[in-house]
Image (cartoon, rainbow, N blue to C red):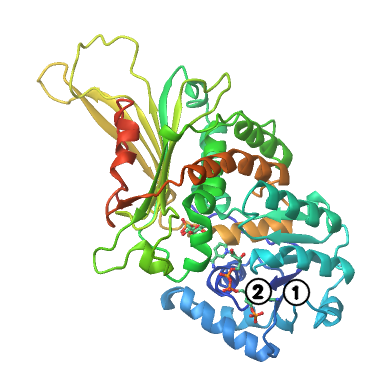
Amino acid sequence: MVSRVIPVDPFDLVIFGATGDLSTGKILPGLYRRDADGQLPEAARIVGAARSPMGDEDFRTLVRAAIHAAIPEKKRDREAIERFLTRLSYVAVDATGEDGWPELAAKMRPDVVQAYYFSVGPGLFGALAERLHAHGMNAETCRIVVEKPFGHDLASARALNATLAEHFDEHQIYRIDHYLGKETVQNLMAVRFANMLFEPLWKAQYVDHIQITVAETVGVAGRGGYYDKSGAMRDMVQNHMMQLLCLIAMEPPYAFEPDAVRDEKLKVIRALDPVRPADLVRGQYRAGGGMGSYHDDVEAPDSRTESFVALKAHVSNWRWKGTPFYLRTGKRLRARTSEIAVTFKDPPHSIFGDQEGHRANLLVIRLQPNEGIKLKVTIKEPGPGGMRLIEVPLDMSFAEALGPGAQEIPDAYERLIMDVIRGNQTLFMRGDEVEAAWAWTDPIIAAWEARGDRPQPYDPGGSGPEDALMLLHRDGRRWREIRP
Ligand SMILES: NC(=O)C1=CN([C@@H]2O[C@H](COP(=O)(O)OP(=O)(O)OC[C@H]3O[C@@H](n4cnc5c(N)ncnc54)[C@H](OP(=O)(O)O)[C@@H]3O)[C@@H](O)[C@H]2O)C=CC1
Ligand SMILES: O=C1O[C@H](COP(=O)(O)O)[C@@H](O)[C@H](O)[C@H]1O
């Protein structure tokens, strides 16, 4: 099965922070892949912008090297790379000064989509919006793409929303959460709302509990400066994990349209109960396996920032009252794996007696790696041994299901940038959503700060601190194993 690539409209895309890590590691290689796939029209242009002085050719050399670093040789096409590079130019611009702005403004073509990607530190988001406005680059049809973190707490997120709103309308603001661009995350909506099978059972009456796990093997070395001021709660839970929870818990939107989807997500966030201190575990990785500890990585021996969080959340509405949502995320864990597991309740009565092989149905939506969906069902063990029950998986790996002719799953950034050009905000966060997420997160953080809590140390290569296991044990449940 080969899926179609629909070219987007002609565009001018300016990447502020074009020489930085995100731009060279994800954005530009992603745009190259879209181009190589035939999704960029002839008249698509990309302008790199940062303070460092360099000419167009220097920038192309930098981007060629970035594509080589990001994409394995057998997947690179020399001709396609050179064609892609002809789309690029560079302007030296200072977000906080006047240098370069008139030159940049002069480059923008009024008759194509104009998009500005803020791939710079969050302290510059407001300044960029202001400069774009001042130089007439905020026409109705312009779009700005704002990276994370969107604020550090509710107050700063509100202030940033207010600054952006002075210069751009909400329909022009694309707040990125790259988890929403992941193929399987979008599939979550397809599974829920394009099938009749699951939705009738998707409620507290039939669902025992839901686990959302985003486990990473990497530590924070190299990003310690940012991470130590943030921690897992701000870095992962407030955005990616809450977005996953929203997609799992929300009511069916009336259409797959930006405000229809975002209204439903917002309702979920607003229905979240405050988290009790007893329902929250914070951890910090120790040294081990030849690697340094969290303290070594951030070069702050007394840091109390968490590299792991596990918590129990409750969505207080008709659909979910009584069903716990267990969330956990952490660095330096056993494997890089992200999944959502929905455990259904036992049938009300077993006509087969109390058999060992009989387990509750389980739906596992695997976000990465090995994207796919697995449904565990109970059947009769084949053979003459009488009515003995066993649990078997109905397993659908996307790679296998779509077959060898299928396209590779695009990186989240590729999908999201194409949506910006198409003018589709469905997979971007609205300002009120981000604020509601901070409004839920802030008191949790404030409570542990007030208590002066230290995170619990955990060994690298495991599944986090002991208390995270207890969070489920005391409810008579178990986390799923973190497996590659
Ligand atoms: N790296 C990643 O994987 C991820 C990054 N992000 C977010 O993306 C954004 C960028 O991160 P990252 O690429 O890692 O950061 P880097 O520090 O690697 O890059 C910053 C970029 O901004 C430019 N820059 C800095 N100051 C100015 C200025 N005053 N005016 C114009 N350009 C400036 C720099 O170039 P120069 O010095 O030449 O001006 C450079 O191109 C951040 O908000 C980050 O939180 C989000 C998720 C993942
Ligand atoms: O936003 C972030 O996400 C990454 C994890 O993203 P993934 O696509 O690799 O799952 C995380 O490592 C980083 O700390 C965080 O800022």
**289 left or right of 130?**
left
- Location of residue 18 (image quadrant): bottom right
> 10 Å neighbourhood of mark 2: few (<14), some, or many (≥20)?
many
Q: Nearer the viewer, residue 43 or 55?
A: 55
Q: From the viewer's side, name the closer residue of 391 and 279.
A: 279
The verdict on label 2 being within 8 Å of ligand 1 is: yes
Q: Is residue 360 above or below residue 373?
A: above
- Residue 332 shown left or right of residue 173 in the figure: left
Query: Which residue type does callout 1 highlight?
Result: Ala
- The disc, 2 or 1, on the residue closer to the chain's N-terminal end is 2
Please report the residue visible at 39 percent of the width from the left and 56 percent of the height from the top.
Answer: 331
Observer-side mark, 2 or 1, equals 1
User: Is residue 227 something that shows in the picture?
Assistant: yes
* Residue found at x 71% / y 78%: 49
Mark 1 close to ligand 1, CB under 8 Å: yes
**Is 333 rendered above or below residue 327?**
below
